[in-house]
């Protein structure tokens, strides 16, 4: 098979593919065999009808059309692979010539993914900073306080309610004139600020005292349960008593209760070690992100609008799926963020452009360094995915092959290797090392403490 490539418009190529008869004859024979198995012609067994009889009874044009319908896409995919092209749209195919004992010739005009041709100087020595990994005493204090919150006790409070208290309440909930049994509670211990009954109740409870009665109308939030979320309810709430949280002292008894250690110093030492390990992992991840950002910022590539639009739509659809999984509409989610759909689409487009540039850059590095993916690499990744999803590795591998996702997985592995190389060759400097050391020694350095979204040591 001979293929020539001609650049026509921007990001568009025209492939001219010529297949000699000896290469397409097997496909043509397979078409005759398929038709022979489908038709019934007197005097011939099914599947044993000669070609000349099929041509006479069914029509040579029918055979030709069926052959072309299956063979041309196959030869097109082979030509694309041979020329190492990445189409981003369906091709426009024109048949140039096909006759008995003559080559099959067709053209395919298609928009393709751009390619970056990079030299080593383009991606070596990227300069980035690494977050400090020193653990400050304030970091440890933060985690100790979180442990204290978990082991807090409730004690009566002879004062008005404040945010963070627990109150015993009676709740009567109505939807119109009908009582909502699932929301009606007696002697219910409620955490002020939890949002279980919506925000209006939490806003009115602070400042109240036992005996006060509140009336609020509120749309129930996620804390009310999946069946009640979004239900509009009229609540009558009687405050019966107030309880404040009493945090345990940070002493050896607390360490024994909250951990496997006998002393508070042992607990702090363990937290110091585990926080250090966590910060090192976070710093490693941050360096990879920053190196990739630096690479993206260093390249200039014209990206086809088709590619940007497709990636943008994919991200918008993913946002809608996330909203649905949370029991919300995309409009609800955007309103909660103070966004509208125009801002969502613009943000998705901006992220799409950077994601595409990242892929193109890493693919360019992989080509320059001749990075390849082997069976061992694929096996390792498939085993990891199978373990994560509780699947059998062999069955998962078959599914990936069957759906064509094995190619996507191989691409991900290659881009990962390319990023590893970029990080290895980057010039990485530590940031804020003096401040971090001062804070770790008890100074006033500005060290970011972990929040609830980070990994718990």
Image (spheres, grey):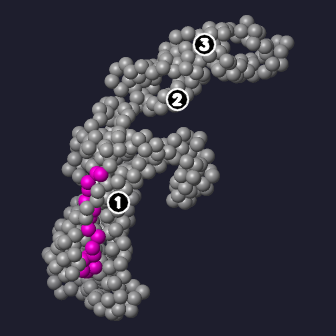
Position of residue 345 relative to residue 263, above or below, is: above
Mark 3, secondary structure of its residue:
loop
Position of residue 330 relative to residue 117, above or below, is: below
Mark 2, secondary structure of its residue:
helix
Please, which residue is most extreme toward the right here?
Answer: 43
Report the magenta residues as a range: 125-142
Residue ID for mark 3: 103
Residue ID for mark 1: 285
Position of residue 416 relative to residue 196, above or below, is: above
Mark linked to residue 265: none
**Earlier sequence position, callout 1 versus callout 2:** 2
Residue ID for mark 2: 82
- 334 is within the stretch colored magenta: no
Please, which residue is most extreme toward the top here?
Answer: 56
Q: Nearer the viewer, residue 249 or 75?
A: 75
Q: Position of residue 410 (x, y in %)?
A: 50, 45
């Amino acid at each position: 098979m001979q293929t020539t490539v001609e650049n026509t418009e921007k990001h568009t190529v025209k492939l001219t593919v010529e297949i000699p008869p000896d290469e397409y004859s097997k496909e043509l024979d397979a078409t005759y065999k398929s038709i022979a198995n489908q038709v019934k012609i007197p005097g011939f067994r099914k599947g044993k009808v000669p070609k000349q009889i099929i041509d006479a009874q069914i029509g040579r044009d029918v055979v030709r059309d069926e052959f072309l319908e299956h063979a041309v896409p196959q030869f097109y995919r082979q030509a694309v692979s041979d020329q190492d092209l990445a189409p981003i749209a369906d091709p426009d195919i024109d048949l140039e010539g096909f006759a008995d004992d003559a080559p099959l010739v067709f053209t395919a005009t298609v928009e393709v993914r751009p390619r970056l041709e990079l030299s080593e100087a383009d991606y070596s020595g990227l300069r980035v900073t690494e977050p400090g990994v020193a653990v400050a005493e304030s970091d440890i204090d933060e985690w100790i306080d979180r442990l204290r919150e978990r082991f807090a006790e409730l004690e009566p409070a002879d004062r008005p309610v404040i945010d963070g208290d627990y109150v015993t309440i009676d709740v009567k909930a109505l939807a119109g004139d009908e009582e909502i049994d699932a929301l009606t509670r007696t002697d219910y211990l409620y955490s002020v600020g939890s949002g279980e009954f919506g925000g209006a109740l939490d806003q009115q409870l602070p400042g109240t005292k036992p005996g006060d009665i509140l009336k609020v109308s509120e749309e129930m939030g996620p804390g009310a349960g999946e069946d009640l979320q979004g239900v509009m309810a009229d609540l009558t709430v009687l405050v019966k008593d107030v309880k404040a949280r009493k945090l345990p002292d940070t002493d050896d008894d607390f360490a024994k209760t909250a951990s496997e250690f006998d002393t508070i110093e042992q607990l702090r030492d363990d937290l110091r070690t585990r926080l250090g390990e966590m910060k090192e992992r976070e710093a490693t991840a941050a360096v990879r992100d920053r190196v990739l950002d630096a690479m993206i910022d260093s390249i200039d590539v014209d990206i086809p609008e088709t590619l940007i639009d497709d990636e943008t739509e994919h991200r918008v659809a993913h946002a809608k799926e996330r909203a649905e999984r949370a029991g919300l509409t995309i409009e609800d989610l955007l309103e909660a963020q103070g966004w509208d759909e125009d801002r969502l689409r613009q943000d998705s487009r901006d992220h799409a452009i950077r994601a595409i540039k990242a892929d193109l850059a890493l693919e360019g590095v992989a080509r320059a360094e001749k990075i390849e993916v082997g069976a061992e690499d694929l096996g390792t990744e498939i085993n990891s995915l199978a373990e994560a999803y509780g699947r059998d590795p062999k069955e998962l591998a078959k599914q990936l092959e069957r759906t064509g996702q094995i190619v996507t997985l191989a691409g991900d592995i290659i881009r990962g290797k390319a990023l590893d190389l970029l990080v290895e060759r980057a010039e990485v400097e530590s940031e804020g090392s003096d401040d971090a050391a001062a804070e770790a020694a008890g100074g006033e350095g500005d060290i970011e403490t972990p929040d609830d979204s980070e990994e718990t040591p």
